Amino acid sequence: MTALSLRAVSARHGTKVVAADVDVTLEKGGWLAIIGPNGAGKSSLLKAIVGIVHHDGEILVDDAPTSALSNRERARAIAYAPQTPQLPDRLTVTDYVLLGRTPHLSPLARERKSDLAVVSQVLERLDLGPLATRALQTLSGGERQRAVLARVLAQEAGLLLLDEPTTGLDIGHAQALLDLIDRLRHEEGATVVSTLHDLTLSAQYATQLLLLDKGNVVATGSPAEVITRDTIARHYDARVQVLTTEDGQLVVAPTRSPDRAEQLTPDNN
Ligand SMILES: Nc1ncnc2c1ncn2[C@@H]1O[C@H](COP(=O)(O)OP(=O)(O)OP(=O)(O)O)[C@@H](O)[C@H]1O
C-alpha cells in the first residue's frame, strides 16, 4: 500500500509559495527525510501534509485524499511532532502523553484501561517511566523532546510526521530515538516523514531523501544518490567529505577550507 503520495503539492503561507510542486511516493514502512538548508521550506511542507499550512495539489494517505478526511480520521491516520511545540507546562508527563489517545476516545469519554496501557508502554519504550509524574515544566530540553515523541507514539497513527525530532538531544539519545522510530517501522509498519538537519543521520536512517532548496525539489532518491559532496556544496554552500564506514554507512564530515587549516597546523602556531 502507498502510505503517502504527494501530487504536485505546493505549500504556501498566504500567497507566498515556500515549497513548490512536490511529487513523492512513500510505501508503507518507508522513511522519507526532507532535507535542505535553513528556510528551504521543509517544515512548511510537513505542516501542509498535517493540514496546518495551506497547500495546492493532492495529498493521499493510505491512498485516500486527506481533503476527504474528518479531523478525527486525520488524527488517527497522521501523528505530528512540531519542531518547537508549545507544551501545557503544568501537565504531568503521563497526562500529556494521554492527550495522544484523544482521537481514539468518543467525545467527552474518559480514557480506558487500554489507553493507559498504551501510555505506560510508550513511556517505558522512551525511558520516561521515572519521569511519568513530573510536570512538563520541570523537564530538561531533551526530556521534553522525548515526551513530545511519546505523545505522538501514543496516538498509534500509521504515518508519523516528525519535525527535527533530534533537536536538543545528545548523540546517544538521538540515536536511541531514531533506533526506536526505525523499530516501529520494521515491527509495526509505521511510515515516517521527518525533517532532519543532520545529514549523516538522514543518510543512515531514511530510506528515501528529498532535498529542498529555496522551495524547489532539487534532488530525490536513496541516501547514496542524494548525499554527495557536490550536491551538498551546491545547495548548502558547505565543504564536506562523504565517507563510508567499514560496514557501508555514509558519514558526512565537514572539512575546513585548506588555506585556513594550513595556517592552524602546530608548526605555524
Ligand atoms: N507562518 C509563516 N508565514 C509566512 N512565512 C512563513 C511562515 N512560516 C514560515 N515562513 C517562511 O517560509 C519559508 C520556509 O520556512 P520553513 O520553516 O518551512 O523552512 P525550513 O526549511 O523548515 O527552515 P529551517 O531549517 O530554518 O527550520 C521561510 O522563508 C519562512 O520565513
Image (tube, rainbow, N blue to C red):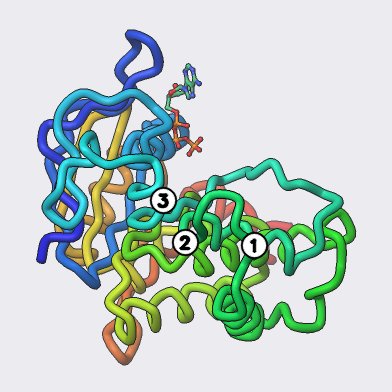
Left or right: 197 as drawn, with respect to 185: right
Q: Is residue 242 visible?
A: no
Occupied quadrant, residue 102: bottom right
Q: Residues within 10 Å of mark 3 (few under 14, many from 20)?
A: many
N-terminal label among 3 and 2: 3
Pointers 3 and 1 in contact (C-beta within 8 Å): no
Which residue carries the number 2 mark?
A: 104
Q: Quadrant of the C terminus?
A: bottom right
Image-based side of 206 in relation to 260, left or right: left
| Residue linked to disc 1 | 110
Q: Position of residue 54 (x, y in %)?
A: 34, 23
Pointers 1 and 2 in contact (CB under 8 A)?
no
116 or 166, nearer to the observer: 116
Instruction: Locate residue 32, reporting x and y percent.
Output: 28, 58
Nearer to us of marks 3 and 1 is 1
Q: Residue at x 67, y 69 (%)?
A: 170
Q: From this viewpoint, is residue 8 visible? A: yes
Q: CA distance from mark 1 to mark 2?
A: 11 Å
- Under mark 2, the amino acid is His
Residue 66: image location, x then y, percent: 24, 41
Q: Which amino acid, mark 3? A: Ala
In the foreground, 203 or 32: 32
Q: Which mark is residue 75?
A: 3
Q: CA distance from mark 3 to mark 2?
A: 9 Å
Q: Which mark is residue 162?
A: none
Distance of label 3 from label 1 (alpha carbons) = 18 Å
Vertically, is 80 above or below 7? below
